[in-house]
């Protein structure tokens, strides 16, 4: 009797085949994990608790920002109202600043267009969230970034807490310096990513380096130095991490060849800085050090002492704990200080006719990250005293930064909630129905009057390009606007309609009280009709029908194409292609920091 199955074919179902392959992959992965004894910093329960505390602290200190539609003040103005307008900033060659500026595509405008697109329902929401949650985001960033030097969770908590309390962050928040806030959060994450050698790490390093570089071009030497160090110490492919930053910045780099120094000017709205120079800059404060009820001299001395103690502890971590990455961070910190010494005294931009220098906060951040990391490693290595030295270190940092830390809660911040509109609602409604019109904004000053021309619904953050901020000479149309403003604030037979027709001006806004002498002077001119007092000032409408000035707003398609291709490659590299390892590695195996984790001791 024959067996009917004996000569037949054996079939394996697809589900069984998938199961066998999964078992084989799991077995291979288990072997790799057994061979991988590299210690890593884990984001455990203690880190989550401290993140929760940082979130509560951030919501208490930044409560004024909660629920805001948009933020404005200092170096910050609202983002566009729609995602379409935000996306149009990518590759834009036209800016409405100063009546219209045509220049090469701006990397910062493109970055903010991408950031604004993350919250497509309201591009301003991501900015409000960034400022309201800056403290917890900075803590997480500092904690994760500490993983590039140590696997001790206590040391990482000290770094994260110090990073969230630094004056460099809170001065930037109170002055509306969104570029410095972005760089502050991204820098430690970049340090963690560039320390890795996998494709995933380098993908994230390329994205984070682009965010830092485009936000603060003065950090470009630091980024380049960090990537070169990583390339010559075992990962030559790290040089590819420069590609996304160059994709954002190549038009601006080319445009700055005639005056390279202006390339390093702060991006966004130019705003004066009170940064000290000379020896006082070694306090690593972005402004003059200040403590409650303490003279400036004593506050400066105290800031010097804090830096000196941190530096001493960092040297111990470098020499005694034999942590070479601390030495690399000190080299990058020295690069940042040299960059500040070279660029700090220079006038790089213009704001309301005044020269504006560089804000040193992000450059000091590079130094602070090395000092905080080294000090935390040394403190955590003192086993018998780490339990009380770590809280004392955090308390000292909180006391040092108390004034800028509480600026928002105390109402001392220049940034405040505002509406998305930068012009009166009447103007916004009219320009929506009849786009292309311009509004002349007049603001009395101590020695004259400031004139600004804005088109359609007004200038937004993405339109403050580097070319607009660093221009040194007035264009022909700017000189005409200045002449028009000077004639408007005096009673004369000046022909307003003839003057405004060339510039396409349909509205005039005076940012002053109704009792200001300029009100009667402007009202005396024929051809204007008073609309009334608005939330943005006193508004007049030009009686005659003014033809809109044609503007070429076509984006640079080559810029968009290059940025899109490079960005896509970076994103693909940054996407994990496998699950994280399941087997935890004891932190006391670390050869870099020379300390053991408190959670395993």
Image: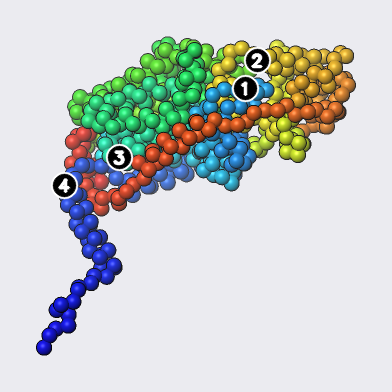
Between disc 2 and disc 3, whose residue precedes?
Answer: 3
- Secondary element type, mark 2: loop
- Between 359 and 250, the residue placed more toward the observer is 250
- Between 67 and 474, the residue placed more toward the observer is 474
Between disc 4 and disc 2, whose residue precedes?
Answer: 4
Residue indicated by mark 1: 101
User: Do callouts 3 and 4 mark residues in contact (Cβ within 8 Å)?
Assistant: no
Q: CA distance from mark 3 to mark 4?
A: 19 Å
Q: Position of residue 371 (x, y in %)?
A: 32, 26
Residue indicated by mark 3: 199
Q: Is residue 225 above or below residue 57?
A: above
Mark carried by residue 475: 2
- Secondary element type, mark 4: helix
Q: Residue 448's image quarter? A: top right
User: Mark 3 or 4, which is nearer the eye?
Assistant: 3
Q: CA distance from mark 4 to mark 1?
A: 59 Å
Q: Is residue 388 above or below residue 343?
A: below
Q: Which residue is at a point 19% across and 54% down the rendered structure image?
A: 28
Q: CA distance from mark 2 to mark 3?
A: 48 Å
Residue indicated by mark 4: 35
Q: CA distance from mark 2 to mark 1?
A: 9 Å
Q: Is residue 489 visible?
A: no
Q: Residue 485's image quarter? A: top right
- Would you call the spot at circle 3 few (<14 residues within 10 Å), some (14-19), or many (20 or more)? some
């Amino acid at each position: 009797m024959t067996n009917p199955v004996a000569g037949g074919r054996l079939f394996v179902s697809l589900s069984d085949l998938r199961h066998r392959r999964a078992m084989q992959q799991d077995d291979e992965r288990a072997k790799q994990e057994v061979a991988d004894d590299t210690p890593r910093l884990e984001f455990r329960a203690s880190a989550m608790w401290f993140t929760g505390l940082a979130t509560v602290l951030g919501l208490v200190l930044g409560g004024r920002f909660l629920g805001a539609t948009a933020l404005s003040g200092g170096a910050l103005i609202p983002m566009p109202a729609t995602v379409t307008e935000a996306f149009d900033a990518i590759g834009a060659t036209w800016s409405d600043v100063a009546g219209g500026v045509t220049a090469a595509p701006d990397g910062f405008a493109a970055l903010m267009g991408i950031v604004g697109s993350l919250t497509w329902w309201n591009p301003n929401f991501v900015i409000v969230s960034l400022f309201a949650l800056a403290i917890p985001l900075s803590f997480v960033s500092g904690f994760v970034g500490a993983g590039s030097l140590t696997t001790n969770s206590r040391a990482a908590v000290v770094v994260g807490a110090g990073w969230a309390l630094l004056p460099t962050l809170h001065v930037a928040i109170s002055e509306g310096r969104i570029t410095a806030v972005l760089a502050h959060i991204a820098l430690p994450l970049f340090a963690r990513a560039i320390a890795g050698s996998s494709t995933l790490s380098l993908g994230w390093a390329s994205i984070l380096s682009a965010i830092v570089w485009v936000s603060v071009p003065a950090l470009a030497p630091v980024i380049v130095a960090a990537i070169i160090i990583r390339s010559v110490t075992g990962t030559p492919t790290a040089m590819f991490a420069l590609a996304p930053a160059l994709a954002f910045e190549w038009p601006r780099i080319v445009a700055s060849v005639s005056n390279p120094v202006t390339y390093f000017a702060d991006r966004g709205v130019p705003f004066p800085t009170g940064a000290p120079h000379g020896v006082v800059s070694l306090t690593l404060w972005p402004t003059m050090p200040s403590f409650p009820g303490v003279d400036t001299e004593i506050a400066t001395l105290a800031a010097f002492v804090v830096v000196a103690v941190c530096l001493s502890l960092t040297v111990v971590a470098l020499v005694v704990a034999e942590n070479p990455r601390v030495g690399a961070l000190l080299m990058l910190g020295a690069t940042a200080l040299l960059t500040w010494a070279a660029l700090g005294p220079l006038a790089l931009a213009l704001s309301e006719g005044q020269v504006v220098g560089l804000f040193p906060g992000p450059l000091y951040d590079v130094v602070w990250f090395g000092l905080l990391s080294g000090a935390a490693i040394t403190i955590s290595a003192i086993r018998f005293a780490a339990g009380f030295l770590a809280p004392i270190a955090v308390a000292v940092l909180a006391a040092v930064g108390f004034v800028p830390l509480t600026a928002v809660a105390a109402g001392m911040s220049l940034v405040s909630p505002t509406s998305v509109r930068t012009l009166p609602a009447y103007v916004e409604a009219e320009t929506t129905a009849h786009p292309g019109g311009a509004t002349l904004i007049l603001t009395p000053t101590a020695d004259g009057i400031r004139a600004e021309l804005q088109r359609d619904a007004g200038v937004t953050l993405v339109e403050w390009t580097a070319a607009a901020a660093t221009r040194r000479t007035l264009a022909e149309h700017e000189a005409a606007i200045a002449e028009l403003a000077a004639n408007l604030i005096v009673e004369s037979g000046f022909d307003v309609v003839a003057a405004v027709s060339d510039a396409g001006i349909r509205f005039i806004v005076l940012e002053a009280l109704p009792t200001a002498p300029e009100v009667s002077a402007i009202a005396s001119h024929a051809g204007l009709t008073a609309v009334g007092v608005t939330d943005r000032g006193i508004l007049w409408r030009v009686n005659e029908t003014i033809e809109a000035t044609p503007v070429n707003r076509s984006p640079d398609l080559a810029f968009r194409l290059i940025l899109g291709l490079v960005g896509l490659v970076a994103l693909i590299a940054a996407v994990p292609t496998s699950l994280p390892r399941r087997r935890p590695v004891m932190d006391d195996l670390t050869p870099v920091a020379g300390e053991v984790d408190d959670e395993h001791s």
